[in-house]
Amino acid sequence: MEYPESAHRKNRKRFSSGWGSLVIVLLLLLAFTLFPSFGNLIYRHLFFPAFRFVWDYTIGLLPFPLVLLVIIALVGGFIHAIIKSVRGQRNILWMLTGWLASWVASFFWMWGFHYACPNLMTYTPQQLRTADYHAWALSQAAELDSLRRLASGTLDDELPADSLRQAVKRVLREHDWPLSGAPEVHALRDGGWIRRLGIAGIYLPYAGEAYTSATFTPLARHFIMAHELSHAYGVTHEGEADYVAWQALRTSPAPALRYAGALQLFMQLRGALRAQHDSLWRHVVQQTPRLVQRDIELLRLDNGRYPEWRKGLGERVNDRYLKLMGQADGVATYDLFLDMAWQELHSSPSHEQQP
Ligand SMILES: [Zn+2]
């Protein structure tokens, strides 16, 4: 197709501005990766808190999930490119590649640079043995027994919107983490399609807010929401996001939240033990208090109602994404939560991790 001279110029302009901004981003990413303290100062302590504040108190105040605007921008941009192409005003390949480069660059400005900044905490890999998991799980089971009784009758209570955010902020503040703005996490009435994609929750940098499915029971949802809120404040490490969620819940004044946090740790512990030693896992299941075991069964049944469309696809995509972002262990980083929790529970005050 023949394009007029002015269209060629517009094509090149759109193409070069998109790729130009991506080149700048990649150079910054390299600088932050080589000098994480530089990224920590410039991006995490200056740019991102300012973005977080302005975003949350302007566009973030709109009374609907901002993912709608993101979808409109994506679909609108795509349709715009096609129309221009059909009219012979632009070359669709020039437009789409430049446009894609702009979206990738925006991702880093809005959040992705955190991957090149230091983690929330330093911790020592614990190299826990099977016997450690077993003893820990038994002690957790005993603790859950009393927590379950305290939380009885309140497990289905919904939280006031701000209380979970405050709990997450409290944990992050203890690690001198920069905090700004008031990010949202929406439980979407999605009929469970988020879960069918193999996703429990997701933070969407373009929207500046996080999403999960309203089909999760509050007992499962509060942990997911706290995990996603930690992402909204810039925590990228998945094990750390689990750790923040667990700490936020376990130190809450609400018994239902303390129980939800302890139960999540317990389920992950049992999973780790089962992978290593089936009969010890069975012993822990036998020792699990009856009501706690029933809650775990109900959560399992609930998950069974929303099976993944392609089993393991969500995890594989997440694994690729995390590795692309420089987290070499991919989804295995989630497992480090247990190491972090162990260190938190078993360290003497003089050995507690530094931020
Ligand atoms: Zn996460």
Image (spheres, helix red, strand yellow):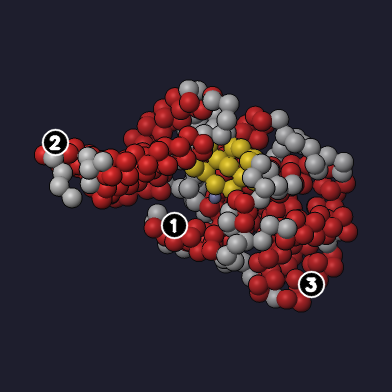
Q: Which structural element holds mark 3? A: helix
Residue 321, disc: 1
Examine the image and state in which quarter residue 293 appears.
bottom right
Q: Can residue 90 be seen here? A: no
Nearest to N terminus: mark 1 or mark 2:
2
Left or right: where 57 falls relative to 259 = left
Mark pair 3, 1: CA separation: 35 Å
Of circles 3 and 1, the one toward us is 1
Mark 1 and mark 2 in contact? Answer it, CB < 8 Å.
Answer: no
Q: Is residue 121 above or below residue 301?
A: above
Towards the viewer: 139 or 236: 236
Q: Which residue is mark 2?
A: 6
Left or right: where 52 falls relative to 269 = left
Residue 129, given in percent of the width and then of the height, sits at: 64, 70
Label 2 neighbour load within 10 Å: few <14, some 14-19, many 20+: few
Amino acid type, label 2: Ser
Q: Which residue is mark 3?
A: 282
Mark pair 2, 3: CA separation: 72 Å
Mark pair 1, 2: CA separation: 39 Å
Amino acid type, label 3: Arg
Nearest to N terminus: mark 3 or mark 1:
3
Amino acid type, label 1: Tyr
Residue 256, disc: none
Q: Which structural element holds mark 2? A: helix
Residue 135, given in percent of the width and then of the height, sits at: 74, 65
Residue 279, given in percent of the width and then of the height, sits at: 76, 77
Nearest to N terminus: mark 2 or mark 3:
2
Q: Is residue 253 above or below residue 93?
A: above
